[in-house]
Amino acid sequence: MNERNKKENRPSFRKKPEQKSTGRQAVEKKFYDNADMMQLFNVTSRTLQRWRAEGIVPYKKLGGKIYYLAHKVDDLMEDDEQSSD
């Protein structure tokens, strides 16, 4: 095998693979943590703990930290506004 064949058969790591666009745009998910929720609702961490225990606000716990999905919190606020009318 000569030098030219060796170079041609070697994989090139310099080229980046092309990504094909599927026409979809990535959906950005925004999360609130406890600090955000405390500021947003002007409540204490204990109140948030009680809301979670009572199932008032949906949440996820990842790696010991609690997150609230922003659109679910917003939906919850809208539902509460409609029921108080």
Image (spheres, rainbow, N blue to C red):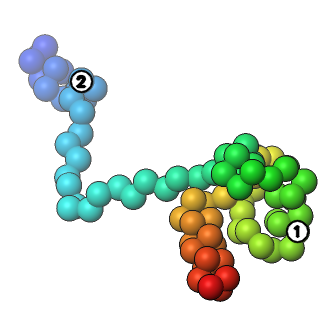
Residue lying at 62% horizontally and 70% vertically, measured from the top left: 77
**51 or 63: which is nearer to us?**
51
Residue lying at 84% horizontally and 50% vertically, measured from the top left: 44
Residue farthest top in this picture:
3
Which residue corresponds to mark 2? 14
Looking at the picture, how far across and down is residue 48, in whole percent? 82, 58
Helix, strand, or loop for circle 2?
loop
Name the image quarter holding residue 61: bottom right
Residue lying at 59% horizontally and 83% vertically, measured from the top left: 82
Q: Amino acid at mark 2?
A: Arg
Q: Residues within 10 Å of mark 2 (few under 14, many from 20)?
A: few
- Asked whether residue 53 is in view, the answer is yes
**20 or 81: which is nearer to us?**
81
Whole-angstrom CA distance, mark 2 to mark 1, is 53 Å
Looking at the picture, how far across and down is residue 84, in whole percent? 67, 82
**17 or 85: which is nearer to us?**
85
Q: Is residue 24 toward the left or the right of residue 58 in the image?
A: left
Residue lying at 71% horizontally and 68% vertically, measured from the top left: 58
Q: Nearer the viewer, mark 2 or mark 1?
A: 1
Q: Is residue 38 toward the left or the right of residue 7 in the image?
A: right
Upstream in the sequence, badge 2 or badge 1?
Answer: 2
Query: Is the C terminus in the top left, top right, bottom left or bottom right quadrant?
Result: bottom right
The image shows residue 13, relative to residue 72, as above or below, that is above
The image shows residue 19, relative to residue 73, as above or below, that is above
Which residue corresponds to mark 1? 53
Q: Residues within 10 Å of mark 1 (few under 14, many from 20)?
A: few
- Asked whether residue 67 is in view, the answer is no
